[in-house]
Image: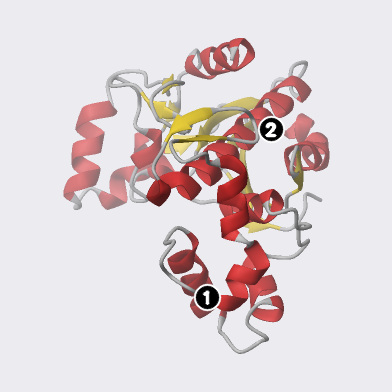
Amino acid sequence: IVRLGRALSEIESRPLNLNFKNLTKSLSKTYVRNFWKKYKDTKQYVRYNLFGTKTGRLSTVKNSFPIHNVSKDVRCAIEPTNDYFVELDFNAAELRTMLALAGKPQPEQDMHDWHINNVFDGDESRDEAKRKVFAWMYNPERKEPALDKMYDRDAVVQKYFNGSQVSTFFHRTIPADEKHALNYIIQSTTSDLLLRRMLAVMEHLENTGSFVSFCIHDNLVLDMRKEDCYTIPELVEIFSSTELGKYKVNMRVGRNFGDMKEINKWT
């Protein structure tokens, strides 16, 4: 908790680099105009509340820049202080966490493509497979025999829920009823995984001019100098190496937060 508090203080100490010129073509939209008026004349900081949710997932305090809820229409105004934003996020993070807690190995490929071949026998489109999985995941009354067999939801709940509270893999205790138990187990565990990986990435960047700019749920956004970009493969490796196994990581790169392009690896 102490290390995490220091890390969040470090993030909060750096103002965002907002370039409002990037919004000029979108000023016909009311949201964009209101955003411009509200944030143009003062420095903006992302300030997190470490204790703002039951599960430990970070929220922001009242006067923080609302990084979790910024519309795609204005993300282009958020630019790196250095040369690039590099965004790392776990591929289908909560599904991977549930699979890991059920004692199953992590697929190296995209989770939804893996479901098509290993759960649905190739009979579903990617969008349909994705829809079915998420409709089933947190609804205890919904039955999908192939998914029930693969993930063993009941075993995960029995292991971490005692009828009145869940105790997660990372020993976080959360009051819960049966309806919300799995949600809390998975969301809390995934959030703690992200925060632990964030600390490891920050430690690796300590002696560089690059830094963690902010995180949004399961995504970590790095503000990278060109001369530090050789470390990106190492950072991906650090981020992917979780306490629950090797999670596949998606990476996006851009010169502003509204124009991030997915790439398979840094070259």
Point out which mark residue 181 bears: none
Check if mark 1's residue and mark 2's residue have beta carbons within 8 Å.
no
The amino acid on which the numbered mark 1 sits, given as a three-letter code, is: Glu
Residue 5's place in the image compared with 38, above or below, is above
In this image, 136 relative to 199: left or right?
left
What residue is shown with label 1?
A: 144
What residue is shown with label 2?
A: 197
Write the residue at 52% across / 39% down: 162
SS category of the residue bearing label 2 = helix
In this image, 117 relative to 40: left or right?
right
- Residue 102, percent across and down? 69, 54
- Say how many tags the image has: 2
Q: Nearer the viewer, residue 223 or 103?
A: 103
Residue 242's place in the image compared with 198, above or below, is below
Classify mark 2: residues with Cα within 10 Å, few (<14), some (14-19) or many (20+).
many
Q: Nearer the viewer, residue 32 or 147?
A: 147
